[in-house]
Image: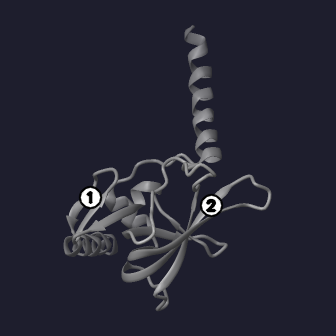
Amino acid sequence: MKRLFPFYAISGLVLLCLTTYCFGICISRTPEEIIEQSQFVIHGIVKGMRTLWTDDHSRIYTYVALNVLDVFKGDLGGRNEITVRFRGGRGPGGDWLADNQPRLEEGMEVILHMVQLKDGYLVIRGCEDGAYYVSNGMVWGKSGKVNMTLDQFKEFVDTVIGQREEE
């Protein structure tokens, strides 16, 4: 049995790597890590959403149109409307077809942490951990990792960015 332990350990690591790559498993990150790893952190309102399958029906994506209210990190080139793409969406029965993705709705006020892919799409960094919700001036995350006012959140982002620049 002891001789088989290295085999099982390596097999488990390979399986974990493959499932992470193939199925897009998201690793939980701290709010600081998500800010550091994002090109953009924006505050906006969901204007509209549409879910589309790829031409070969192998993947489903949701495209979220946002009115940008404020940019906390990055430069959107003056754009006040953007489209963000994320994996998954609502199926025929209204069910969400991907785990770990944010649940956004039209009219929702949000803060999104994003990166821009080589193909030009903006995507949310950190899956559902990269989408915060704003209600009555308070920012909160589904994971409960953030609970502060909008002004406190702006200061928090500035602090994280400032600490990174000092290093």
Label 2: few (<14), some or many (≥20) within 10 Å? some
Instruction: Work out which quarter of the rendered image holds the C terminus and state it.
Output: bottom left
| SS at badge 2 | strand
Tell me which residue sits at (38%, 52%) in the image: 29
Residue linked to disc 2? 61
Residue linked to disc 1? 146
Label 2 close to label 1 by CB (< 8 Å): no
Image height check: is 46 above or below 94? below
| SS at badge 1 | loop
Residue 19, image x, y percentages: 61, 40
Tell me which residue sits at (47%, 62%) in the image: 125
> What kind of residue is marked 2?
Tyr
- Which quadrant of the figure has residue 129? bottom left
> What kind of residue is marked 1?
Val
Residue 61, image x, y percentages: 62, 61
User: Which residue lies most toward the right here?
Assistant: 56
